[in-house]
Image: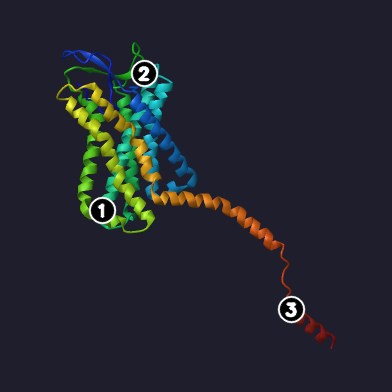
Amino acid sequence: MDNSLFTGSDFTTPISLQGGQTIFISYFPTALADTIASLLSLTATFAFLVILWFTKFYKQQLLTMVFFLLFADFTVSFAFFSVLIFSPSSASECKMVFFISFFGRNSSLFWSVSFAHALKTAVESKDFSPAARLMRYYYIFAVYLPIIISLVVVLSPLVVYNPDLQKCGRYETVGQFDYTYFLLSGMPLLLSCLLSIYFYLRTGCRLKTLFNGTAAKTRDALVLVLYPAIMIICWGPNLVWSLLSMAKTLDPALLVFPKVCLAMHGFLNSLVYGLAQKTRQDLKGLCCSKHAPAQEEITQRMLSMIPDPIDHDANVDDETKYIDTNV
């Protein structure tokens, strides 16, 4: 039985185990499929984080949420590849890497829920401004709460280092349900999916009211609609697998699809922002603005070479004053 809800754990012992036996489940499997997908997510999230940072677009309220969501996805992929390059060799290193990855995972989930809630708020008020007033609560929910959960997990026996296998993971007893792991790992995922679906149902068929506006409003609407949907699509298969594995033994080969979906989460989130028409317009305007100062300087130099026009009226007045003085 595998009730792991993190990244699709690998068994290090045969599947045909008797109840009561202890198995070790690694947290960072290295299958080729999810490695390639994670590389795509790492590259895409890093690229758009750089764009958001240097263009200062992240200062806009909604794009601030996008920035933190992509940063969370980036930390997950970064932790995955750091394990591939520098394999942890102690329990402290395992806990550090797992904290980064687990924080990014939960933060990404909670930011997706925040987008779903912002969508419901925007539809009810027919405006995006109420979501800006809720940013303080979104920060608490999607940044501070994942930090607390991650600290609790890494300080518990759920993250250990196996010196024989040289892997990070946890021990699990066959036939026994690990309530602690499910509470700290499974419940955030389950609640995130259920809350996003609930906010979608509350929104209903009123979504079309958000798409009647400018290109900027259309991009904001797409962000609010698609980010929670991507979270459900990417994490849903893993959730279903984990719930089914509690009831019966499943073929580990079927776990490839949920793992690839998880690894593609950051890549798909990046595409939502990057392929929006308003984003392309902003980037095009930024590139054009870089050439504007040089062209303006050339224009000013050309104008400075033109002599000032002669003011004939001023000369006439001066001459009249001179005559009056002589008289």
Of the image marks 2 and 3, the number of the one nearer the N terminus: 2
Name the element at disc 3: helix
Name the mark on residue 207. 1
Q: How many marks?
A: 3
The residue positioned farthest toward the top in the image shown: 164
* Front tag of 2 and 3: 3
Determine the CA span between mark 2 and mark 3.
89 Å
Task: Please identify the quarter of the rendering in which residue 104 is found.
Answer: top left
Choose between 307 and 316: the one closer to the eye.
Answer: 307
Is residue 134 visible in the rendered image? The answer is: no
Q: Which residue is mark 2?
A: 91
Q: Quadrant of the N terminus?
A: top left
* In this picture, residue 163 sits left or right of residue 47: left
Q: Nearer the viewer, mark 2 or mark 1?
A: 1
Q: Which quadrant of the figure has residue 37?
A: top left
Disc 3 packing (10 Å; few <14; some 14–19; many ≥20):
few
SS at badge 1: helix
Tell which of 273 and 151 is nearer to you.
273
Residues at badges 2 and 1 in contact (C-beta under 8 Å)? no
Residue occupied by mark 3? 312
Disc number for residue 240: none
Under mark 2, the amino acid is Ala
Q: Is residue 318 visible?
A: yes
Mark 2: few, some, or many residues within 10 Å (few <14, many ≥20)?
Answer: some
